[in-house]
Structures are given as C-alpha cells and as structure tokens.
Amino acid sequence: MLGSTNITITVAFLAGLASFLSPCVLPLVPGYISLISGVSIDRLKQQTEERSNAPLGDREFAGL
C-alpha cells in the first residue's frame, strides 16, 4: 500500500512540474512575482541598468 502511494505522489509532482514549465504558465511567473513583491518591472529594469554601469572597473580589471 505504501509503495503505490509513493508512486502516486511522484507522478503528481512530475505532472505539476510539467504543467508549471509549460509555455502557457512559465511566461506568467515574472509578472506574478512582481505583483506579489510589489516591485514593478520598470523598477527592476532601472536597477539592472544601474548595476550594469557600476562594475566597469571590474570588467576592465578582468580584461573583458
């Protein structure tokens, strides 16, 4: 009895993972995380631009 329960849980987990990674759901994840966290995508892009400009000295040091 216990062995069939483990198989059922495994199959259910794999089915949930497959549905999460499907092309219909995965593109919605960034918007959902933004909604839950309260941070807008524009603000995230602004922070990314600020970070990409800051480590210029590190890139020069690494020879990139």
Image: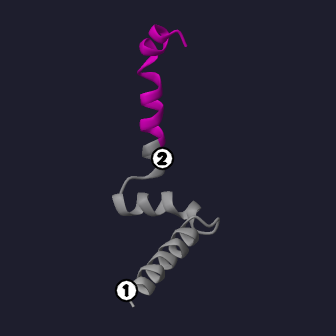
Residue 22, image quadrant: bottom right
* Disc marking residue 2: 1
Q: Pointer 2: what residue?
A: 42
In the visual, does 2 lie left or right of 62? left
Q: CA distance from mark 1 to mark 2?
A: 50 Å
Residue type beneath disc 1: Leu
What x and y, as percent, mark residue 16?
Answer: 51, 74
Position of residue 38 relative to residue 54, above or below, is: below
Residue 22 or residue 51, whichever sits in front: 22
Secondary structure under badge 1? Answer: helix
Give the magenta part as a residue range. Answer: 45-64
In the visual, does 36 lie left or right of 19? left
Mark 1 or mark 2: name the one nearer the start of the chain.
Answer: 1
Residue lying at the far left of the rendered structure: 37
The overriding secondary structure of the stretch rendered in magenta is: helix
Magenta stretch holds residue 22: no
Q: Residue at x 47, y 50 (%)?
A: 41
Q: Residue at x 41, y 21 (%)?
A: 54
Residue type beneath disc 2: Asp
